[in-house]
Image (cartoon, grey):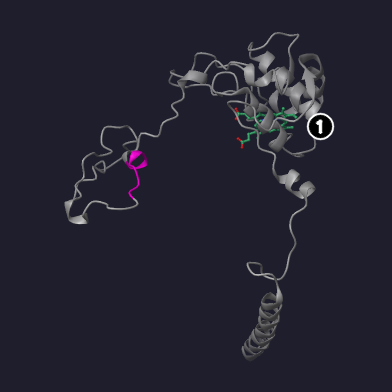
Protein backbone atom coordinates (compact mmCIF):
# COMPACT_ATOMS: atom_id res chain seq x y z
CA UNK A 1 0.00 0.00 0.00
CA UNK A 2 1.18 3.55 -0.70
CA UNK A 3 1.12 5.82 2.34
CA UNK A 4 2.25 9.08 0.76
CA UNK A 5 0.33 10.68 -2.03
CA UNK A 6 3.54 11.69 -3.80
CA UNK A 7 4.72 8.13 -4.44
CA UNK A 8 1.93 7.00 -6.72
CA UNK A 9 2.14 10.31 -8.53
CA UNK A 10 5.86 9.84 -9.15
CA UNK A 11 5.27 6.28 -10.19
CA UNK A 12 2.57 7.54 -12.57
CA UNK A 13 5.04 9.94 -14.19
CA UNK A 14 7.62 7.17 -14.56
CA UNK A 15 5.06 4.87 -16.12
CA UNK A 16 3.97 7.55 -18.56
CA UNK A 17 7.56 8.02 -19.68
CA UNK A 18 8.01 4.27 -20.11
CA UNK A 19 4.76 4.10 -22.06
CA UNK A 20 5.86 6.89 -24.37
CA UNK A 21 9.12 5.10 -25.02
CA UNK A 22 7.22 1.92 -25.79
CA UNK A 23 4.85 3.74 -28.13
CA UNK A 24 7.77 5.26 -30.01
CA UNK A 25 9.27 1.77 -30.34
CA UNK A 26 5.99 0.42 -31.73
CA UNK A 27 5.62 3.36 -34.11
CA UNK A 28 9.15 2.77 -35.41
CA UNK A 29 8.48 -0.93 -35.92
CA UNK A 30 5.20 -0.11 -37.65
CA UNK A 31 6.96 2.27 -40.01
CA UNK A 32 9.20 -0.54 -41.17
CA UNK A 33 6.36 -3.04 -41.57
CA UNK A 34 4.18 -3.79 -44.56
CA UNK A 35 1.70 -1.02 -45.27
CA UNK A 36 -1.66 -1.70 -43.65
CA UNK A 37 -0.15 -3.71 -40.79
CA UNK A 38 0.95 -2.58 -37.37
CA UNK A 39 4.25 -4.40 -37.26
CA UNK A 40 3.26 -6.99 -34.69
CA UNK A 41 1.12 -10.08 -34.48
CA UNK A 42 0.84 -12.74 -37.20
CA UNK A 43 -1.94 -14.16 -39.34
CA UNK A 44 -4.14 -16.65 -37.50
CA UNK A 45 -3.43 -20.24 -38.50
CA UNK A 46 -6.17 -22.37 -40.10
CA UNK A 47 -6.28 -24.44 -36.88
CA UNK A 48 -6.82 -21.32 -34.77
CA UNK A 49 -9.57 -20.08 -37.07
CA UNK A 50 -11.23 -23.51 -36.99
CA UNK A 51 -11.31 -23.31 -33.19
CA UNK A 52 -13.40 -20.15 -33.30
CA UNK A 53 -15.40 -20.78 -36.47
CA UNK A 54 -17.89 -23.18 -34.96
CA UNK A 55 -21.27 -21.71 -35.82
CA UNK A 56 -23.88 -23.94 -37.43
CA UNK A 57 -26.67 -22.30 -39.39
CA UNK A 58 -30.14 -23.26 -38.23
CA UNK A 59 -32.25 -23.50 -41.36
CA UNK A 60 -29.89 -25.51 -43.59
CA UNK A 61 -27.30 -26.85 -41.13
CA UNK A 62 -24.35 -25.22 -42.92
CA UNK A 63 -21.27 -25.75 -40.76
CA UNK A 64 -22.32 -29.14 -39.33
CA UNK A 65 -19.19 -31.34 -39.19
CA UNK A 66 -18.83 -34.99 -40.25
CA UNK A 67 -19.90 -37.58 -37.70
CA UNK A 68 -23.14 -39.12 -36.50
CA UNK A 69 -24.97 -40.31 -33.40
CA UNK A 70 -28.00 -42.44 -32.61
CA UNK A 71 -30.78 -41.97 -30.09
CA UNK A 72 -29.50 -45.07 -28.25
CA UNK A 73 -26.00 -43.66 -27.89
CA UNK A 74 -27.47 -40.32 -26.86
CA UNK A 75 -29.41 -42.01 -24.05
CA UNK A 76 -26.10 -43.18 -22.54
CA UNK A 77 -24.20 -39.92 -22.94
CA UNK A 78 -27.14 -37.91 -21.63
CA UNK A 79 -27.36 -40.03 -18.48
CA UNK A 80 -23.66 -39.43 -17.78
CA UNK A 81 -23.26 -35.80 -18.79
CA UNK A 82 -26.61 -34.05 -18.69
CA UNK A 83 -29.22 -35.81 -16.54
CA UNK A 84 -27.91 -34.37 -13.25
CA UNK A 85 -29.18 -30.96 -14.33
CA UNK A 86 -31.78 -31.65 -17.01
CA UNK A 87 -33.34 -34.88 -15.62
CA UNK A 88 -33.13 -38.35 -17.20
CA UNK A 89 -35.95 -37.56 -19.63
CA UNK A 90 -35.25 -33.86 -20.04
CA UNK A 91 -37.81 -32.93 -17.38
CA UNK A 92 -35.34 -30.57 -15.64
CA UNK A 93 -33.92 -30.94 -12.12
CA UNK A 94 -34.61 -28.13 -9.68
CA UNK A 95 -34.36 -24.83 -11.49
CA UNK A 96 -32.40 -26.22 -14.47
CA UNK A 97 -34.31 -25.97 -17.73
CA UNK A 98 -36.59 -28.62 -19.16
CA UNK A 99 -35.49 -29.86 -22.55
CA UNK A 100 -38.70 -31.68 -23.45
CA UNK A 101 -42.43 -31.14 -23.23
CA UNK A 102 -44.55 -28.02 -23.45
CA UNK A 103 -46.01 -28.98 -26.84
CA UNK A 104 -48.94 -26.70 -27.70
CA UNK A 105 -48.42 -24.52 -24.58
CA UNK A 106 -47.04 -21.41 -26.27
CA UNK A 107 -50.35 -19.53 -26.13
CA UNK A 108 -51.05 -20.49 -22.51
CA UNK A 109 -50.69 -18.02 -19.64
CA UNK A 110 -47.59 -19.96 -18.59
CA UNK A 111 -46.03 -21.14 -21.84
CA UNK A 112 -43.39 -23.85 -21.54
CA UNK A 113 -40.52 -23.01 -23.86
CA UNK A 114 -38.46 -26.10 -24.60
CA UNK A 115 -36.40 -27.36 -27.52
CA UNK A 116 -39.49 -29.30 -28.64
CA UNK A 117 -42.18 -26.68 -28.14
CA UNK A 118 -40.26 -23.59 -29.17
CA UNK A 119 -37.04 -23.98 -31.16
CA UNK A 120 -37.42 -23.54 -34.94
CA UNK A 121 -34.40 -25.52 -36.21
CA UNK A 122 -32.82 -28.87 -35.28
CA UNK A 123 -29.23 -27.93 -36.35
CA UNK A 124 -29.39 -25.12 -33.76
CA UNK A 125 -29.68 -27.78 -31.07
CA UNK A 126 -26.42 -29.33 -32.29
CA UNK A 127 -24.79 -25.88 -32.29
CA UNK A 128 -26.01 -25.03 -28.79
CA UNK A 129 -24.91 -28.29 -27.17
CA UNK A 130 -21.58 -28.15 -28.99
CA UNK A 131 -20.75 -24.61 -27.88
CA UNK A 132 -22.33 -24.42 -24.42
CA UNK A 133 -22.94 -27.79 -22.77
CA UNK A 134 -22.36 -29.47 -20.39
CA UNK A 135 -22.48 -26.21 -18.50
CA UNK A 136 -19.38 -26.91 -16.37
CA UNK A 137 -17.30 -28.13 -19.35
CA UNK A 138 -18.38 -26.55 -22.64
CA UNK A 139 -16.55 -27.70 -25.84
CA UNK A 140 -15.58 -30.99 -24.18
CA UNK A 141 -17.87 -33.28 -26.26
CA UNK A 142 -16.93 -35.05 -29.51
CA UNK A 143 -18.95 -34.28 -32.66
CA UNK A 144 -20.39 -37.83 -32.52
CA UNK A 145 -21.56 -37.37 -28.93
CA UNK A 146 -23.18 -34.03 -29.78
CA UNK A 147 -25.01 -35.72 -32.69
CA UNK A 148 -26.15 -38.51 -30.34
CA UNK A 149 -27.38 -36.02 -27.70
CA UNK A 150 -29.22 -34.04 -30.37
CA UNK A 151 -30.92 -37.24 -31.57
CA UNK A 152 -31.88 -38.18 -28.00
CA UNK A 153 -33.37 -34.77 -27.14
CA UNK A 154 -35.34 -34.71 -30.42
CA UNK A 155 -36.61 -38.20 -29.60
CA UNK A 156 -37.61 -37.13 -26.06
CA UNK A 157 -39.78 -34.53 -27.75
CA UNK A 158 -41.38 -37.11 -30.10
CA UNK A 159 -39.91 -35.30 -33.10
CA UNK A 160 -37.82 -38.24 -34.41
CA UNK A 161 -38.28 -42.03 -33.98
CA UNK A 162 -36.12 -44.22 -31.72
CA UNK A 163 -34.01 -45.47 -34.63
CA UNK A 164 -33.11 -41.95 -35.80
CA UNK A 165 -29.43 -41.27 -36.47
CA UNK A 166 -28.40 -37.61 -36.49
CA UNK A 167 -25.78 -36.42 -38.97
CA UNK A 168 -25.12 -33.43 -41.21
CA UNK A 169 -27.67 -34.70 -43.78
CA UNK A 170 -30.49 -35.83 -41.51
CA UNK A 171 -30.61 -32.91 -39.03
CA UNK A 172 -31.49 -30.12 -41.50
CA UNK A 173 -34.39 -32.28 -42.73
CA UNK A 174 -35.98 -32.52 -39.28
CA UNK A 175 -39.10 -30.37 -39.19
CA UNK A 176 -39.45 -28.68 -35.79
CA UNK A 177 -43.07 -28.26 -34.62
CA UNK A 178 -42.81 -24.49 -34.03
CA UNK A 179 -40.89 -23.80 -37.26
CA UNK A 180 -43.62 -21.74 -38.91
CA UNK A 181 -44.54 -19.57 -35.93
CA UNK A 182 -41.48 -17.36 -36.26
CA UNK A 183 -41.54 -14.25 -38.37
CA UNK A 184 -38.37 -13.57 -40.30
CA UNK A 185 -39.15 -10.08 -41.55
CA UNK A 186 -38.35 -7.17 -39.29
CA UNK A 187 -41.47 -4.98 -39.18
CA UNK A 188 -39.79 -1.78 -38.03
CA UNK A 189 -40.32 0.90 -40.67
CA UNK A 190 -36.71 2.10 -40.67
CA UNK A 191 -35.36 -1.37 -41.49
CA UNK A 192 -37.49 -1.50 -44.65
CA UNK A 193 -36.39 1.88 -45.99
CA UNK A 194 -34.11 1.76 -49.02
CA UNK A 195 -30.90 3.68 -48.33
CA UNK A 196 -30.36 6.52 -50.78
CA UNK A 197 -26.84 6.90 -52.12
CA UNK A 198 -27.26 9.70 -54.71
CA UNK A 199 -29.79 12.33 -55.79
CA UNK A 200 -31.63 11.92 -52.48
CA UNK A 201 -34.64 13.85 -51.22
CA UNK A 202 -34.20 17.37 -49.97
CA UNK A 203 -34.12 17.09 -46.15
CA UNK A 204 -36.70 19.89 -45.92
CA UNK A 205 -39.17 17.73 -47.86
CA UNK A 206 -38.80 14.64 -45.65
CA UNK A 207 -41.99 13.82 -43.74
CA UNK A 208 -42.79 11.02 -41.26
CA UNK A 209 -45.12 8.72 -43.17
CA UNK A 210 -45.44 5.82 -40.75
CA UNK A 211 -45.07 5.25 -37.02
CA UNK A 212 -44.28 2.37 -34.70
CA UNK A 213 -47.60 2.81 -32.93
CA UNK A 214 -49.89 -0.19 -33.00
CA UNK A 215 -47.22 -2.54 -34.32
CA UNK A 216 -46.69 -4.26 -30.98
CA UNK A 217 -43.00 -3.49 -31.07
CA UNK A 218 -42.59 -1.92 -27.65
CA UNK A 219 -44.61 -3.52 -24.88
CA UNK A 220 -46.69 -0.86 -23.14
CA UNK A 221 -45.62 -0.60 -19.52
CA UNK A 222 -46.40 2.79 -18.04
CA UNK A 223 -46.73 6.21 -19.59
CA UNK A 224 -47.61 7.08 -23.17
CA UNK A 225 -46.36 5.02 -26.09
CA UNK A 226 -43.77 6.73 -28.29
CA UNK A 227 -45.72 7.66 -31.39
CA UNK A 228 -42.71 9.11 -33.25
CA UNK A 229 -44.70 12.25 -34.02
CA UNK A 230 -42.67 15.35 -34.86
CA UNK A 231 -42.37 17.67 -31.87
C1 LIG B 1 -24.42 -28.16 -14.39
C2 LIG B 1 -25.74 -28.19 -14.95
C3 LIG B 1 -25.89 -28.54 -16.42
C4 LIG B 1 -25.39 -29.63 -17.08
C5 LIG B 1 -24.55 -30.77 -16.53
C6 LIG B 1 -25.90 -29.54 -18.43
N1 LIG B 1 -26.65 -28.41 -18.58
FE1 LIG B 1 -27.67 -27.86 -20.24
N2 LIG B 1 -28.23 -26.14 -19.34
C7 LIG B 1 -27.92 -25.79 -18.05
C8 LIG B 1 -28.40 -24.44 -17.81
C9 LIG B 1 -28.23 -23.64 -16.54
C10 LIG B 1 -28.99 -24.00 -19.01
C11 LIG B 1 -29.59 -22.64 -19.32
C12 LIG B 1 -28.49 -21.78 -19.83
C13 LIG B 1 -28.98 -20.43 -20.28
O1 LIG B 1 -30.17 -20.24 -20.51
O2 LIG B 1 -28.12 -19.54 -20.43
C14 LIG B 1 -28.90 -25.11 -19.94
C15 LIG B 1 -29.43 -25.08 -21.20
C16 LIG B 1 -29.44 -26.15 -22.07
C17 LIG B 1 -30.14 -26.20 -23.32
C18 LIG B 1 -31.00 -25.08 -23.90
C19 LIG B 1 -32.40 -25.15 -23.32
C20 LIG B 1 -33.31 -24.08 -23.88
O3 LIG B 1 -34.44 -24.39 -24.28
O4 LIG B 1 -32.90 -22.90 -23.91
C21 LIG B 1 -29.85 -27.39 -23.90
C22 LIG B 1 -30.36 -27.89 -25.23
C23 LIG B 1 -28.97 -28.10 -22.98
N3 LIG B 1 -28.73 -27.34 -21.87
C24 LIG B 1 -28.45 -29.35 -23.23
C25 LIG B 1 -27.55 -29.99 -22.38
C26 LIG B 1 -26.89 -31.23 -22.70
C27 LIG B 1 -27.10 -32.02 -23.97
C28 LIG B 1 -26.08 -31.54 -21.63
C29 LIG B 1 -25.13 -32.69 -21.49
C30 LIG B 1 -24.06 -32.75 -22.42
C31 LIG B 1 -26.26 -30.48 -20.66
N4 LIG B 1 -27.15 -29.55 -21.14
C32 LIG B 1 -25.64 -30.47 -19.41
C33 LIG B 1 -27.28 -26.57 -17.12
C34 LIG B 1 -26.65 -27.77 -17.39
Tell me the quarter of the picture where residue 42 sits.
Answer: bottom right
- Judged left or right of residue 137, residue 93 is left
Q: Residue at x 59, y 18 (%)?
A: 116
Tell me the quarter of the picture where residue 176 sits.
Answer: top right
Which x, y percent locates residue 162? 74, 9
- Judged left or right of residue 84, residue 157 is left
Query: Looking at the image, can residue 90 be seen?
Result: no
Residue hosting label 1: 142
Is residue 124 depicted above or below 22 in this figure?
Answer: above
Query: What quarter of the picture does the N terminus occupy?
Result: bottom right
Q: Residue at x 54, y 22 (%)?
A: 118
Judged from the image, the quadrant occupied by ligand 1 is top right
Point out the stretch of residues depicted in magenta. Answer: 190-196
Q: Is residue 198 magenta?
A: no
Tell me the quarter of the picture where residue 173 sits.
Answer: top right
**Residue at the extreme front of the image, as rendered:** 199
* Callout 1: CB less than 8 Å from ligand 1: no
Q: Residue at x 70, y 73 (%)?
A: 33
- Judged left or right of residue 70, residue 97 is left
Secondary structure, mark 1, is loop
Is residue 4 depicted above or below 67 in this figure?
Answer: below
Which x, y percent locates residue 3? 67, 86
Amino acid sequence: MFRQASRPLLLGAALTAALKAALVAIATAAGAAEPGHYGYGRPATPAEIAGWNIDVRGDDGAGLPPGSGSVAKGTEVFAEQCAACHGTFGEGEGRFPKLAGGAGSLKDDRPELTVGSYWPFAPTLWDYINRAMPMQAPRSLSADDVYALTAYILNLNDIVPGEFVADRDSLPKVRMPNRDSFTWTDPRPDTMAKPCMSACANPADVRISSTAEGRDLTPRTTGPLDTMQPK
